[in-house]
Amino acid sequence: MLKITNMAVTHLMESHQVSDELGFLPKNPLRFLPLSGTSSSRDKYFITIDNLAYLLPGLIKENRISESIKSLPTPDWPLNDLSQSALYRLMLLVTMLEHAYFYEQLKHLTVAELVTIEGPHIIPEQLAIPLYKLWQLTGIAPSMSYELYSPWNYFKLDPLRPMDFDNIKMIHSFTGTEDEKWFVLNHQMVDYRFGPAIRPSLIAHLLTANIQQWNSISPDWITQLLGEVLINIEKMVDVLERMREHCRPDIYFDQVRKFYSIPRNLVFEGVEELKGQTINVLGETGGQDGWKQFMHAILGMDFDDITFGGIHYFKELRKHMSPTRRTLIENIKKESLLRNYVADQKTKNNCKLARRYNSLIKCLLDWMDEHYSLAREYVGRQNETHGTVKAPFGLLQEIRDKTKNYIIN
């Protein structure tokens, strides 16, 4: 049974573009957009936007973002012939320019300040038209998401060596500071450390997803699988604890964080399909990283009822993930009976399995505690009360409190 389940997990992982080695990280993101070689307007756009992306920190310092966007050719070409890697690279560049543009226009210093600026706010057609097309083609909401800014924004210095802090580098940044690069590198390494946790999580999920087969499932199997997951989640907490090594709170708050948020009530100039409409999207946050909601789904934890400002927080975060991530998480949410299986075994005095499950919940709480500590230190001490996607800080505590309720007593 384990062998068959493992084969099913391999198929599941391949179909949802996750791997044992890299987890949710893609392999070898593009560093330049592909050209057709025909000197078309699209090629000219790609060459120009590639150049702007590599010059971005300097353009921001010189307040030349608006001017630079005007230099882009008017988009009048299709994108549906591009590979996924090319689509995601283009969307990374367009959304980074989108965020830099609005900071140059609004000069907001805090998210609390930004949410008071009603708008409407016009996205220039040089960005709006390709951004709308990319939104339709990728299924990712039209702002800079975590998946674009972190997983699709790295390269290995030595392709033959494994991922590590000294062997990966950020491709594009807003500030060029080592603090921003370390902040993103820390998140990329968290994703990398999560890779080996995916397979045992999915095996435990598939083995317990059919209640009719519970009698044929050894609780020792599930205990061992959850132990493998626990080891890797603990490594991820260790990585998060390294954030302070090269990312200074004042630099993060004053120079880096301001580019992650985006105003409300966006108007897509030149996009006929959205004429007369304003669009609201979240900015970028590590909360959009798929591993958290993946683990919530595996462990039978549901936070979809948590809201702020009328927004269902976790549902909204999933809109900023690629469809492959979103579908994987939502399918597991519908099917998962792992927690039920553990609870059933607890009634049969299998306390070892329940302890292992609870250890995983407590490890997630350790992550939340460290994350909340960093949030207070890097943001809260600056008298900011909102996360980068406008959610109030109190939401973090609410999530933590609800997490404790999933411990099986």
Image (spheres, helix red, strand yellow):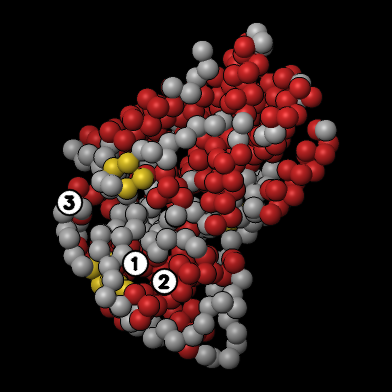
Residue 54 visible in rendering: no
Type of the residue with mark 3: Glu
Residue 81 visible in rendering: yes
Q: Earlier in the sequence, mark 3 or mark 2?
A: 3
Label 1: few (<14), some (14–19) or many (≥20) C-alpha neighbours in 10 Å: many
Q: Which residue is mark 2?
A: 131
- Dot 3: what SS? helix
Q: Which residue is mark 1?
A: 98
Give the residue displayed 38% in from the left and 52% down from the top. 284
Give residue 304's position: percent from left, percent from top: 42, 40
- Dot 1: what SS? helix
Give the residue displayed 46% in from the left and 50% down from the top. 318
Looking at the image, is mark 2 or mark 1 nearer the viewer?
Answer: 2
Label 3: few (<14), some (14–19) or many (≥20) C-alpha neighbours in 10 Å: few
Question: Is 92 in front, or is 224?
Answer: 224
Q: Quadrant of residue 73?
A: bottom left
Give the residue displayed 62% in from the left and 45% down from the top. 23
Q: Which residue is mark 3?
A: 113
